[in-house]
Amino acid sequence: MLLGVCYCDWKCLNERHLDISICQNSELSKANIIDIPNHKIIKRYIENTITNAIVIAGLEPFLQFQEIYDFVQELRNYTQDDVVIYTGYYKNEIKEYVEKLKQYKNIIIKFGRFIPNSNKKYDDVLGIWLVSDNQYAIKIS
């Protein structure tokens, strides 16, 4: 199940002075924000028989850390399935958040900013190709 978040600071684009239209998620920033209570998302996830992980991505999840943390905390009352968080930050930029999430089992974080025209790289943790060779995933717990 993919959960998209609401906000982004466009760090990957700003540090390279790139236009926002380069980001595959730029249209998400224009969408209406839909606030769905955690218990409704979790209920839909638990009742779904075709998935066994939740991916939190689209824009920048760590700008909404408290909401992500609260969601994971509530989710762990029902399942220990993987939670994968895609971030454009590097581990050293969000280490206090990483430390806080370590208390929960099966948390995977994909770190690293999108770099246009970079070589893609296969990530063994996620089992997929990432679009920039500076990106990597770590199972933190």
Image (cartoon, grey):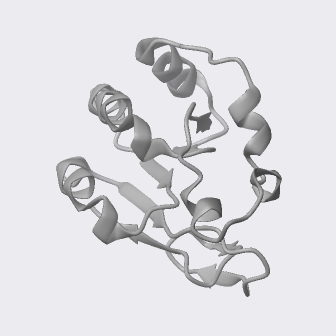
Q: In this view, does 71 lie to the left or right of 110?
A: left
Quadrant of residue 3 in the image? top right
Q: Which residue is drawn at 30% across and 35% down?
A: 69
In terms of depth relative to the viewer, which is nearer, 58 or 103? 58
In terms of depth relative to the viewer, which is nearer, 119 or 52? 119
Residue 68 vertical position relative to residue 90 in the rendered view, above or below: above
Residue 87 vertical position relative to residue 137 in the rendered view, above or below: above
Viewport quadrant of the N terminus: top right
Q: Which residue lies furthest to the front in this view?
A: 17
Q: Residue at x 23, y 47 (%)?
A: 104
Q: Where is residue 89 in the image (x, y as percent from the top left)?
A: 45, 62
Viewport quadrant of the C terminus: bottom left
Q: Is residue 58 left or right of residue 109?
A: right
Residue 105 vertical position relative to residue 36 in the rendered view, above or below: below
Q: Which residue is drawn at 46% across and 12% down?
A: 37
In terms of depth relative to the viewer, which is nearer, 128 or 65? 65
Residue 113 vertical position relative to residue 124 in the rendered view, above or below: above
Q: Which residue is drawn at 18% across and 49% down?
A: 100
Q: Position of residue 44 (x, y in %)?
A: 57, 19
Q: Where is residue 103 in the image (x, y as percent from the top left)?
A: 17, 49
Q: Position of residue 98 (x, y in %)?
A: 26, 57
Question: Total of numbered circles in the picture?
Answer: 0
